[in-house]
Image: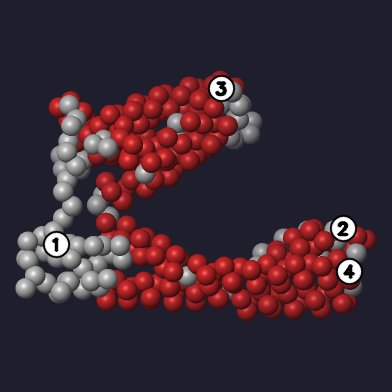
Amino acid sequence: MSDPTPRQHPPYADHRAPWRRSLGHLIFGLNSPAARLYDKVLIVLIVASVLAVMLESLPGLPLATRNILRWVEWAFTILFTLDYVGRLLGARRPLKYARSFYGVVDLLTILPSYLSLLFPGSQYLLIIRALRLLRMFRVFKLARYTDQATLLGEALTASRERITVFFMSVLSLVIVFGTLLYLIEGPENGFTSIPNSIYWAIVTVTTVGYGDISPQTGAGKFLASLAMLLGYAIIAVPTGIVTVGLQEAQAARQGRHCPQCGLNKHDADAHYCKRCGENLPG
């Protein structure tokens, strides 16, 4: 008979000083009004900083306005630097946070400003701050969307071989079409090289159709027509691949049920039941 007592990994000992523990509860927690307010203010600052970067890139902006925006960006950078340092100090395991997705994003959001002192123009990389808006899923407790995003990631991972085969097949086709158009049309009709012709083939097969290069001969137009029809034919293939992957990932989740309480829909990498703590099969 299985033991009904939940089996969980022992928690890591918390050796933080009281002030670091309080700081961690403020920055990482969502169980208090102060913590929720902190995250909401942070999101507002992120949105404002992204808008400031966008405005600075506008042509014809007065020099005085541009200087003000740069000072504003530096103010945001200092605030985000303090937030990053605070997260390192408040985290129970600082190195784990620094290596996590959000830790890397938090670091990337402040580096461009400091790099711009050595490499002018790199401050426009501050647009990476938009990635921090993913914290909204946590702040507003949109866990169901996070779960669906995880499911989509599992489906893409499970379909990576099929996606790779599809990508290599399309790549081979555009190389063949591009080479044939180069031989048929030649430089006099704008197909100055095989890479340039492959660019035309990619634009045509993907149905983008910029129109900056187009065949002029009858044979070239016939081949272009085949490429266009083929492009429409293969548009649905990636959708089908991902759909099958989603169905397989969903079936794998629902198939893992707890032998103790019968709960299903566990994460693929879960080892214990989220209701009773029983070991999951597989």
Q: Position of residue 50 (x, y in %)?
A: 46, 38
Marks 3/2: CA–CA distance? 41 Å
According to the image, label 1 marks what residue? Answer: 277
Report helix, strand or loop for mark 3: loop
Q: Are marks 3 and 4 in contact (CB under 8 Å)?
A: no
**Which tag is nearer the camera, tag 3 or tag 1?**
1
Question: Toward which corner of the image does residue 163 lie, by quadrant?
Answer: bottom right
Q: Which residue is mark 3?
A: 117
In terms of secondary structure, where does tag 2 sit?
Answer: loop
Sequence-wise, the earlier of marks 4 and 1 is 4
How crowded pointer 4 is (Cα within 10 Å; few <14, some 14-19, many 20+) is rated as some
Q: Secondary structure at mark 1?
A: loop
Which structural element holds mark 4?
Answer: helix
At label 1, the amino acid type is: Gly
> Nearer the N terminus, badge 3 or badge 2?
3
Q: Nearer the viewer, residue 203 or 7?
A: 7
Callouts 3 and 2 close, C-beta under 8 Å: no
**Inter-mark Cα distance, 4 to 1:** 66 Å
